[in-house]
Amino acid sequence: MLKLFKRLKAKEWVMAAACLILIVGQVWLDLRLPEYMTEITRLVQTEGSEMAAILTAGGKMLLCALSSMLLAIVTGFFTAVIAATLTRRLQSEMYHKVLSFSSEEMGRFSTASLITRSTNDVNQVQMIVAMGMQMLIKAPIMAVMAIGKIQNTGSWQWTALTAGAVALLLIAIAILMGYALPKFKRIQVLTDNLNRITRENLTGLRVVRAYNAEKYQENKFTRANTEMTENNLKAQRAMACASPVMNVVMNGLTLGIYWIGAILINSAALTDKLNIFSNMVVFSSYAMQVIMSFIMVAMIFVMMPRASVAANRILEVLETKPSIKNGQKDGVTGKTGEIEFRDVSFRYPDADKDVLHNISFTAGRGETVAFIGATGSGKTTLVNLIPRLYDVSSGSVLVDGVDVRDYDMHALRNKLGYVSQKAVLFAGDIRSNITLGENGQAAASDKDVETAIDIAQSSDFVGNIPEGIGGSVAQNGANFSGGQKQRLSIARAIARKPEIYIFDDSFSALDYKTDRTLRTRLKKETAGVTTLIVAQRIGTILDADKIIVLEDGKAVGIGSHRELLKSCPVYQEIAASQLSKEELEL
Amino acid sequence: MRPMRTNHGKPAELSGEGLLHLFRFCKKYLPAIVIALVCAVGGTIFTIIGPDKLQQLTDTITEGMMAGIDMDKVIRICVTLAVMYGCSALLNFIQSMLMTTTTQRVSQSLREEISHKINRLPIDYYNKTTFGDILSRVTNDVDTIGETIQRSIVTLVSSVVLLFGCLFMMFKTNWIMTVSAIAASLIGFALMTLIMGRSQQYFITRQQCLGDINGHIEEAFSGHTVLRVSNAEEQFSKRFETLNEKLFNTSWKSQFLSGLMQPLMGFIGNFGYVTVCVVGAALVMNGSISFGVIVAFMIYVRLFTNPLSQIAQAATSLQSASAASKRVFDFLDAEEMADESGKTASLTAPAGQVGFSHVQFGYDPDRMIIHDFSMQVKPGQKVAIVGPTGAGKTTLVNLLMRFYELNGGSISIDGVDLSSLRRDNVHSLFGMVLQDTWLFEGSIRDNIVYGKEGVTDADLDRITKAVGLYHYIQTLPHGYDTVIDSRMNLSEGQKQLLTIARAMIEDAPMLILDEATSSVDTRTEILIQQAMDKLTEGRTSFVIAHRLSTIKNADVILVLRDGDIVESGNHQQLLQKGGFYAELYNAQFAS
């Protein structure tokens, strides 16, 4: 938690220091109030007081209250600004950090967890800073100053009683919290559990109904629901005890002070009586302040664990160094569209087996190279090495004769048009999705966008949108079908006018006919661009210049469709499962 | 993906409709709530008379200051006070316990109702709403309602009692003092309402900004790879910084304004105190009141300002609870599937003859997509459904399973009209394997058996052997009891095989299969194919087909385009016809 505060700059530290002073002033003023009150009481009580004296005392008290309020407002202003600034900085830092992550770090944290860390956890910290900081400073100051005030006025009996009350209160809070806190911590787990079961039922709606398993799901939900309710009941009931306990302690303390006071006054010498009486009134109001400050401290201890968990989760992200370092080389190499893999091996960190093993091949300008093989054979991993989503474990990947690790990342990616397995669209419009990012060239014109859409076989459905390429795209592209999303993300790669296309299984969401037309158009319109295709369907790659057959991370065959049909058993097997005998002999 | 509010942007509404609904729902707990409220009122009364007693104590002490204190009286008052505090704490405790329990039980049954409702709504309903929305009703909205019941109701009632109690006591004592006390408080409150109104506005914009930024973060992180590879970091950062700036601006303002409440309240209290003292002093000097009146008023004015702000807070919280209840009850009141308890017809082991007769259907009644479709499927035949992406191949599945009702015509099994059967009967006639494999977090056994009774380990062995998963499962640490969760890396193919095993265990007379397309490798694909072939043996089956082998040896091929069935026949017939099917079929080989 404290480490997060390192992110505050001098300006905020000055504000924080100001807060400290303001709070001291505020507490001092607050503690003055009872004195004025007693003074007013005394004046009113004394026969023959001047009205003017009461007004003066009242005016002083109001002034005191007003100043205290103003100080509190200024403090509130500073803390609000500090908290918001800290959150803003944290959020921004998190965001940039995550954008700088490679796929490895993304995988390690998981996207979902990174999202919660940058939203919920950051909010959690803001809340604690905004609310807790004031309390954290105020509580000890108030306790110390109030105790200071009491010191001169109190009899030892009162002090002992107050100490006893504080101890009692702390013990009660400790017991309740000791019981309730673990249950509060479980609430999140149980809520997640309940959410999961509901989500399960919703995503499996058809299956649940097809199997007449509604009761099964509902029973599962009931069990989770009961477990959660019982847990919450225990936690909340413990909390329900807290308020009566606090009231009893506070009321009991006042009562005790008066009771003892009565006895003390009764037995005191005549001259001391009035003195003891006013001391009693003052003491009881300060004793309340002491109790209140201890309650505040206790509350901070309750809030702290949650905040520090959130803070640690944020720090974990912020302190992660991206595993991929940027190179220096710009994009000018004298060559275009050449890719070479030299004896490339790759294994994921902490894995004990290579995903790719000694892969070597070259792709010349304008060639189409396809990768086929079972799931888990390493196709996607292989193409992911080119845009440096991961770095090789040994060997090297060269683009235009330069090792990808030597490139400035932007320069390297300017050469590439990459389409991922899962189509990704962002909220905005079609145009903004297709012209996404930079490619080191002039921004794409509307005409470029339309051409790309046309090549990607999307003119039909884009044409049906009244706003055309200005048509809006919902978050995650929810207003488009899977096939449409995939075609738009292909159009995005085309509009980048890259040297090299990388299609990671991007055609499988399309039907055979669209798949074929798209590839034919692409080849015609963007001749000279090197194309790498990861595919599952033989139909997609029949006409590739080079097909690389992967099995368990090894290249078990390299050649054209016809060559591989003759020489490569793995390829034959794949082909046999997809094409009938006559077709294979075509 | 994340437990987050998805209902941002919807402003809280003022209508009491939601609350009324909630009230009816809570009927069962009414006695508990009433008792809790009585306790709260009792506790409040003690709060009102407590200070009075304490004053008596000081009075007794001051009176006896010179002549010696009447210790008997002191003890009597002290004991009374102690008893009162004790009773007040007890009442407070009973009230809290009752309300906590009520809250939790009401929340529990609301959640339960929602869970049941999910399975009673027509599938169609889910096309109009997102899962996130329903999930947020189960958690966020129910939580909001719970918090309100627990806090606001009691606070509201005890505050009102306290307010009127104070007013009563004050008026009873002296009206001039009362009026000045009220005036002093009201000036403060006018100020506070002003600030509250402003901050409310900032809170709403802050909520919106928060929603925007969370949405942006979610999108950017999920599309991380694409974003990086497109060099779009800069572009996205800019958008993010703009959003972050906006959030910052509204965030500190709303925080600051809401932080004003407490100091303001404190000041109003002090202001009232001084007013009462000054006015009181003037009156005392006039001789129109005694000193004791001032002392009593000093306390009343403090008691009086508290409930006002609490009522204001409770009102805002009731407002959001009302909006939350409306959302929950909108869902609970959504139209359900027609009740079928009156249907007596039932079909248990049909031969598997399926007849379509003049079937008409459209998801939107104004736009029919299947106009007039008739066909007879003989027992044991295999029907392949083909067509381009998005042609509506699942429509037929939806109709066979009666996930949707026909707009005209009928579908019958062995001559029995599907609509005369109960839905669960229809469902029991078909085994179903869908392409998007659905598994849940639970043991492998639970996933395969899925609610069916009397399945032995021997059955499981036989079936997992049939789908080729037996050896894999044996290598797992807990065998069939291994829990499937996100940490367990099942491949797409293995998941598919598990769902096939599930269909095999169900052993329904007919089958609906959706073949996997791309995500499965060739070997697993062969395994799946074999498993599916085993499954379809001797059963009437409907297969959404992507494989040539399936298409070719199907008895009937239904060709879909834009939702409608445009051609039907076997492979040879359709090829000869040279229509849409032939075009589709030839497309994949020409290069």
Image (cartoon, rainbow, N blue to C red):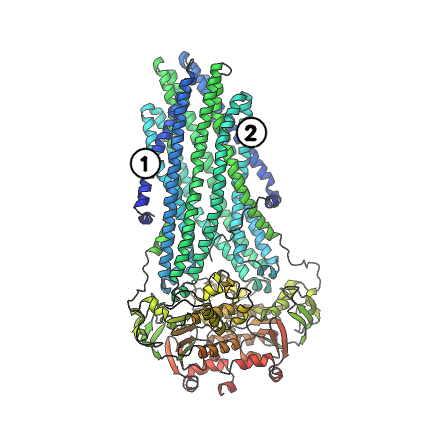
Disc 2 marks a residue whose amino acid type is Phe
In the visual, does B369 lie left or right of B212? Answer: right
Location of residue A175 (image quadrant) = top left
Chain under label 2? B
**Residue B435 drawn at (x, y percent):** 53, 69
Inter-mark Cα distance, 2 to 1: 41 Å
Residue A366: quarter of image: bottom left
What amino acid type is highlighted by mark number 1?
A: Ile
Q: Quick check: marks 2 and 1 in contact, CB under 8 Å?
A: no
x%, y% of residue B273? 45, 26
| Same chain letter for marks 2 and 1 | no
Instruction: Please state which of residues B91 and A301 is positioned toward the viewer in this rendering.
Output: A301
The residue under label 2 is: B164
Q: Residue at x 42, y 47 (%)?
A: B249
Q: Is residue B275 visible?
A: yes
Label 1, on which residue? A21
Residue A38: which disc?
Answer: none
Q: Looking at the image, which residue is at 52% across and 30% down?
A: B44
Question: How far across and down, in percent of the image, does residue A373 sit?
Answer: 42, 77
* Label 2 vs label 1, nearer the camera: 1
Which residue does the image show at 57% across and 33% down from the upper left? Answer: B38
Judge whether residue A269 can be spotted in this image.
Answer: no
Task: Read off the chain for label 1.
Answer: A
Q: Is residue B466 left or right of residue A320?
A: right
Image check: B403 left or right of A192?
right
Instruction: Work out which residue is located at the far top of the displayed protein and give it.
Output: B67
